[in-house]
Amino acid sequence: MLNNTSEFYPFLVNFGVTFKCNFNCKHCFLIKGEDLSFKQIVSIIRQIVSEYKHLFFVLTGGEPFMRNDFLDIVKFLTKEGINFSISTNGSLLNKNIINKLLDTNLSYIQISIDEVKTEYIRGEFIDFQSYENIIKLLLDYKINVVVASVVTNKNIEDIPIISDFCDEIGVKVHRIIRYKPVKPTLLPNLEQVLSLMKELKTKRNIEIDEAFPYVVKRIINKKSEQSCGAGKNFFSVSPDGFLYCCPHWYVLKKNKLAQFLLLGDLKSKKFSQLIKNKKLVEINSFDYKSIKGNCAYCKYLKICKGGCRVAAIYYGDFYGSDPLCIL
């Protein structure tokens, strides 16, 4: 954060390049919309990096490889000297595409693997062997791979299996992502989450999503004191060009508080203007001492700051307790 309390210096921009996807995952928060053109994406990125140097971009979607010009976006970022990662379901990757990712500024590819034996989450059957084949190919080409899994009550038993798979195949990071309540029926209960974290504690390659409450992260890493950086050091651009604090914006689309996280339209205003507005100052001036419910009495409140505000807003109160806290 800069000295001026009305301005925040980001280090990461989560940039959605498309709404399109070839899967229909039940936990996905995206809806349909009109994608930015290649020209618009280039224009927005250029105006962001002209004022904020050394930013890292996460290219996501939807499924980014559904864009016919996605590799042109990759070439543009590389030409501009911008480092980036790609978040993908991995199903469209092949040797030809991987070859085109070599000699770019790609730092790593994150591949989503959420289940082992079923098709419940993805909406269609995915042969687990296909994941193994594409990850081995990426690793053979010396491309760093991160595997990400969203924890729901339908796949929670698969998470340790996926973690073991990552370890066996040579993936150094298995990222455990907190499920945002798109469908409350998929939310794991507190006992399930606690049991999972205790089991994952023995794994070597686990990275816990910072949106988890501190007491959950602490099971894996007792030194963890990081609270969510949404709206402080990372921001999210939707595939239609709107700037948000958090990439889980559409979880709240039908919630009257959703607009609270919308900072503005990058097609008409500069990034530097939007992150100086009063709304962002209000969000980042969140007084954890005013939080309600169980969190108000927690000994970890000063560190945790009450957990995920998106989850709290979903249940109707920006100052509410985090509904997935295990205390």
Image (spheres, rainbow, N blue to C red):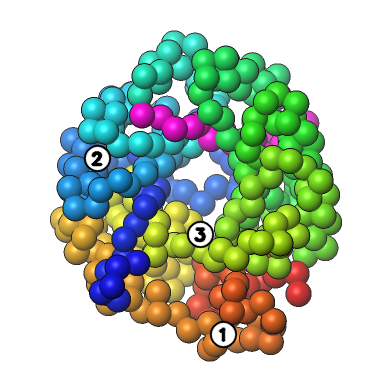
Lower position in the chain sequence, tag 2 or tag 1: 2
- Residue for point 60% across, 72% down: 304
Residue position for label 1: 291
Residue 41 on image: x %, y %: 24, 40
**Part of the protein shown in magenta:** 105-120
> What amino acid is at disc 2?
Ile
Q: Which labelled disc corresponds to residue 41?
A: 2
Question: Separation of disc 1 and disc 3 at Cα?
Answer: 21 Å
| Visible residue check, residue 122 | no
Under circle 2, the secondary element is helix
Residue 207 included in the magenta stretch of the image: no
Residue 280 on image: x %, y %: 33, 72
Q: Answer above or below: position of 41 versus 165.
A: below
Q: Which labelled disc corresponds to residue 17?
A: none
> What amino acid is at disc 1?
Ile
Q: Nearer the viewer, mark 1 or mark 3?
A: 1
Lower position in the chain sequence, tag 1 or tag 3: 3
In the picture, the quarter occupied by the N terminus is bottom left
